[in-house]
Amino acid sequence: MTAQRLSTDAFAAEDVTQLQILMTQLIDTCAAIGRQRDAAGAWQPAASGAEGGFAEAREVIEQLSRSLNRTRRAIRKIDTAARARRTQHRIAADVTWSPM
């Protein structure tokens, strides 16, 4: 089952700020990896030889994977918090006062 998309008003200003920070960090990581290309645009390992090249490639992939996973987890936390706030607002709106 796919989770319902939240509307813009479900997110607090802090959520939007945090999203911008997270995405900036992710893009910075990608840009740093992109700068490892040579003038022709091909990635060239700093280490010479196949063994060094493969080791360096694994490091690049691990760096990118960690950054993606960190960003994904943080965005999931923001989304979960927004959903919890929305649920709390709905519960509060549904509560009606009745005399006993």
Image (cartoon, grey):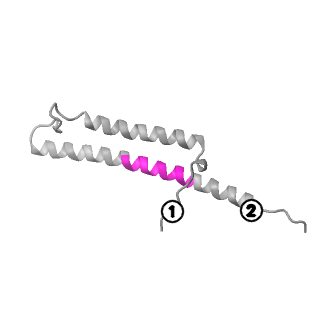
Q: Is mark 1 on a helix, strand or loop?
A: loop
Question: Residue 65, image x and y in percent?
Answer: 32, 49
Using the rendered view, name the quadrant where residue 28 is placed: top left
Using the rendered view, name the quadrant where residue 84 is placed: bottom right
- Is 16 within the magenta? no
| Horizontal arrangement in the rendering, residue 21 relative to residue 95 (left or right) | left
Residue span colored magenta: 68-81
Query: Magenta stretch mostly in which secondary structure?
Result: helix
- The residue under label 1 is 3
Image disc number at residue 94 = 2
- Is 75 within the magenta? yes
Residue at x 55%, y 54% (from the top left corner) = 6
Q: What residue type is labelled 2?
A: Asp
Question: Residue 53, image x and y in percent?
Answer: 15, 43
Residue at x 39%, y 50% (from the top left corner) = 69
Question: Residue 33, image x and y in percent?
Answer: 27, 38
Evaluate if marks 2 and 1 touch, with contact meaning CB atoms under 8 Å apart.
Answer: no
Using the rendered view, name the quadrant where residue 86 is placed: bottom right
Residue at x 42%, y 41% (from the top left corner) = 23
Q: How far apart are marks 2 and 1 (CA)?
A: 22 Å
- First in sequence, mark 2 or 1: give its number: 1
Q: Say which of 40 and 78 sits in front.
A: 40
